[in-house]
Amino acid sequence: MSFAQYMERYDRQELWQGLESTDSSKARMLLAKESISPADFLLLLSPAAETVLEPMAQKARLLTIKHFGLNILLYTPLYLSNYCVNHCLYCQFHAGKKIVREQLSLAEVEAEGKSIAATGIRHLLLLTGESCAHATAAYLSDCLRILRPNFASLGLEIYTLSVEEYAQMVQSGAESLTLYQETYQQESYAKLHLSGPKRDYFNRLDAAERACQAGMRRINIGALFGLAPWRQEAFWAGLHAYYLQKQYPATEIAISLPRVHSSHEGFIVPCPVSDKELVQILLAFRLFLPQAGITISTRERAQLRDHLLPLGVTTMSVGSKTTVGGYFAAEKKGSQQFPVADERLIGEIKEMIRRQGYQPVMKDWPHGANVLPAGGA
């Protein structure tokens, strides 16, 4: 059974009616439960839960400490290439954009990696635009082999692959995969992805499962919040993580909460998500998925990331550049995928984490530890 088939078990009309619940007493009662069912999770995303965010936050913090301790894993993204063949309306890399296109040579990959490793970071996320003709499987394998000596863990955020191709990435040194569905609403997905391989909704929906089958140790999923109504998106993203945990218990599953923002070039976010709504999503995820890693990236501004940290976050990106060649090169190469909102240096992030009573972790947890670093810039 695929996740697409699993989704069909749910009556959407009944689900969305449940999301309109305003019975806060029911939401409060959930806080005493040992485990949260998908139906409970739905209630935690409803307006009813807006009045119990504080007790949700208290429980979320305790659950996170129970399963992850007071550790916050730090990682850095490295963009290898920004060539793309898809037309995704919300992305600055899409094929219709007239931007500077670049791809790192293998020598540049090595230089960028050494520059990042010199900061103490030992978890690296490799990203590309979606063009398999440029960032080929062979190229990605070479990049992984080159970078592996300097990093404890390497992750990928790339175009979708087959089971066999994911297995090739694992053999070359990849331990984690980050793959956002972008939106779980098929109608919205079709409107936002005009052409290219990414237009295939079901191929993307099944890709995380293919990576599990290929032996990828950790999988990080999520929706790009703002593309469709957030309560529905959060429910499907949480249910997707829940499904993967049940189907692949040997694989660590995590979830990210990226928000898309309107651009000065004309893209207007269809369903904006407020800071308070983002908090509710984060808390509901943590209560529903107590053993899942949760990532907050540098898409979010510094002050907000600081406040979100004790609410269930386990992983944060630091020192992010969303250009190709942004670390070692004297001048940045290529155009940004999106602006980085939190531009603090790694040392500043580490100091902030310690001030809050947590421990910044630069190196990945050992195999078998119950955590997943992952997830976007």
Image (cartoon, rainbow, N blue to C red):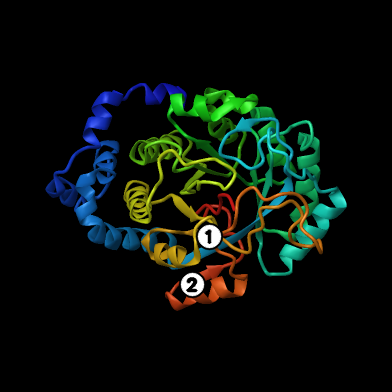
Task: Tell how many labels.
Answer: 2
- SS at badge 2: helix
**Helix, strand or loop for disc 1:** strand
Amino acid beneath label 2: Ile
Considering only vertical position in the picture, is 201 above or below 45?
Answer: above
Above or below, comparing residue 353 to residue 191 in the picture: below
**Tag 2 or tag 1, which sits nearer the N-term?**
1
Q: Which mark is residue 316?
A: 1
Circle 1/circle 2 CB separation < 8 Å? yes
Q: Position of residue 59 (x, y in %)?
A: 28, 59
Q: Which residue is mark 2?
A: 353
Residue 61, given in percent of the width and then of the height, sits at 34, 62
Is residue 370 visible in the rendered image? The answer is no
In the picture shown, does residue 349 fall above or below 300?
below
For residue 128, say whether it is visible. Answer: yes
Q: Residue at x 55, y 63 (%)?
A: 342
Left-right relation of 57 to 173: left
The reply, left or right, for residue 286 in relation to residue 136 is left
Quadrant, the N terminus? top left
Residue 74: image location, x then y, percent: 57, 62
Asked whether 215 or 269 is in front, the reply is 269
Residue at 23% from the left image edge and 60% from the top image edge = 55
When asked about the image quadrant of residue 14, the answer is top left
Q: Quadrant of residue 101?
A: top right
In the image, what residue type sits under mark 1?
A: Met
Depth order, front residue of 133/292: 133
Image spot of residue 175 (x, y percent): 63, 47
In-image side of 221 versus 231 (left or right): right
- Label 1: few (<14), some or many (≥20) within 10 Å? many
Distance CA(mark 1)–CA(mark 2): 10 Å
